Image: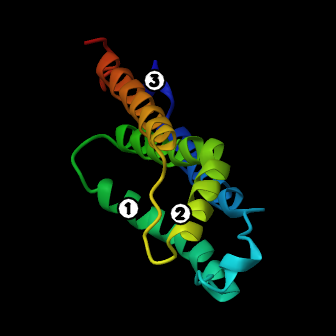
Amino acid sequence: MLFSIPESGWWMIAVAATTFFMIGMLVLGAGMKLPEDLRGAVKQPSKKAKRTALLLMPLGCGAILGMNLLRPEPSPTILFLYSVALASIPVALIPVRGRILKNYIAEKRKNPKAEAMPDGLTTAWIISVLSVLLLGAVIALMMTAHHGTRL
């Protein structure tokens, strides 16, 4: 059932997952402002650097996908895994982005030289979401044979 979608359909899903990832990364930073007292202490990326990153994201994703398609597995399998991986990153990070920023601000105010680490709840959320999505993808692959028959 999972791989009854034609290969062209999987390509469209991969393009949609890449678009979702790019939009998710833009949303991740949108509206997240540091307080005035920390803006000078933390190096902010320039607008040129942000535009370059935005342009390089699809190129990097395409390079990763292209290298993986050289493997002997069928293309729909690789495209499925690629789509799951890209779509899961914004799903894991966007719900806790405010918490990450608050923790970062608190850590930097306490000790500006120290590297800020996420709190335990944030770490548990991100690991849990990524683990569940990975487990779901693995189960979906295990339940679906590539030749149209069940294992």
The residue located at (50%, 49%) in the rendering is 86
Q: Earlier in the sequence, mark 3 or mark 2?
A: 3
Give left or right: position of 102 versus 127: right
Q: CA distance from mark 3 to mark 2?
A: 45 Å
Which residue occupies 60% across, 76% down? Answer: 55
Residue shown at 44%/36% (left/top)?
A: 124
Q: Which mark is residue 93?
A: none
Give me the residue at 66% from left, 57% from top. 28
Of 17 and 121, nearer the camera is: 121
Q: Which residue is mark 3?
A: 2
Q: Which element type, helix, strand or loop, lies under badge 2?
A: helix
Q: Nearer the viewer, mark 3 or mark 1?
A: 1
- What's the residue type where badge 2 is placed? Glu
Q: Which SS class for mark 3?
A: helix
Q: CA distance from mark 3 to mark 1?
A: 23 Å
Q: Amino acid at mark 3?
A: Leu
- What is the residue that sits farthest to the top in this orientation? 150
- Which x, y percent locates residue 123? 45, 43
Question: Is there any visible trace of residue 14 in the rendered image?
Answer: yes
Location of residue 77 in the rendering, given as x and y in whole percent from the top left corner: 36, 37
Q: Depth check: give the residue in front, 43 or 112.
A: 112
Q: Residues within 10 Å of mark 2 (few under 14, many from 20)?
A: some
Name the mark on residue 64: 1
Indicate the quadrant where residue 138 lies.
Answer: top left
Q: Nearer the viewer, mark 3 or mark 2?
A: 2
Label 3: few (<14), some (14–19) or many (≥20) C-alpha neighbours in 10 Å = some
Q: Earlier in the sequence, mark 1 or mark 2?
A: 1
Q: Amino acid at mark 1?
A: Ile
Q: How many labels, in total?
A: 3
Q: CA distance from mark 1 to mark 2?
A: 35 Å
Q: Which quadrant: the C terminus?
A: top left
Read off the residue under disc 2.
107
